[in-house]
Amino acid sequence: MPEDGGSARVSRVAAWMGIAFAVLFVAGQFVPPTAKNQSNTLQWAQLWNSSSHRTTAIIGAYLLILGMLAFIYFASSLRSRFGDGSGMMLGFAVLFAVFAMAAGLIGASIAGAKVFTNAPIPAGALSQQLNSLAGGLIVVPGGLAAGAFVGVAAHLARRAGALPGWLTIAGYVVAILQLAAVVFLPLLLVPLWVLVVSIVLLRGEAKAPATT
């Protein structure tokens, strides 16, 4: 069934939001600075003495937060497309967004405190621990929630025939790999899968949502 003009516009906006999420999420992970030797507490203390490092950390947090807001819009659009049972998918999407945004804020907390309140730079051990906490939030509970989102989305899409079969199978693989997201790299497959889904939506290869 072809989409009407309004539905087509919503799909295009959702697709662009998915693309924005993929770009902003990856940028938000790699823009913030880190100590070259992450076990060296002195390097962590010195890191935040640089105004450029503080600035890039704050920019990275903003990029990540904007990306997760785009992701929520994208996931909400999939909910209307996939129909029954998609509430759980959206719930996992929201959990992923919450953990990722919290991680971004924690990672930029020292830089933000220095820039906005002129707070003193704490000891390197605290900076190191906050970095570990931020990383842990995004790859453990965040990675599991992201994997659950992709897995449920792939299942719903396969049930409804809303996405190509190869893309739903890829979704299952991405979801399972999030069990190893603690090494971080598997988590990058989530924005990649969202990016491909978004391209499919833009090209009109996805099935239109059923109307009643």
Image (spheres, rainbow, N blue to C red):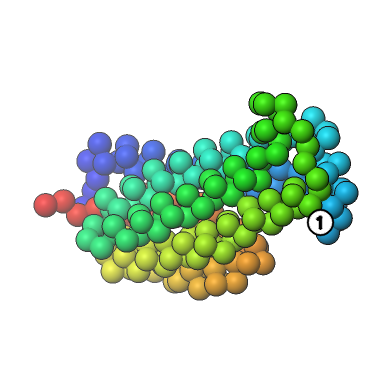
Near-viewer residue (8 or 133): 133
Where disc 1 sits, the SS reads loop
**Total numbered labels:** 1
Location of mark 1 (residue): 38
Q: x%, y% of residue 6?
A: 25, 36
Q: Is residue 104 left or right of residue 169?
A: right
Residue sitting nearer the eye, 186 or 206: 186
Q: Is residue 138 above or below residue 30?
A: below
Amino acid at dot 1: Gln
Point 51% across, 53% down: residue:
99
Residue visible at 60% across and 66% down in the picture: 181
Quadrant of residue 23 within the rendered picture = top right
Within-10-Å neighbours for mark 1: few <14, some 14–19, many 20+:
few
- Which residue is pictured at 54% across the width and 68% down the height? 178
Please tell me which residue lies in front, 103 or 175: 103
x and y, in percent, of residue 210 in the image:
19, 54
Residue 165 screen position, x and y as percent? 39, 69
Give left or right: position of 105 versus 40.
Answer: left
The residue that appears at 66% across and 46% down in the rendered structure is 107
Q: Is residue 202 visible?
A: no
Please say whether residue 111 is visible from this viewpoint.
Answer: yes
Left/right placement of residue 127 relative to residue 205 reads right
Give the image location of residue 60, x and y in percent: 65, 39
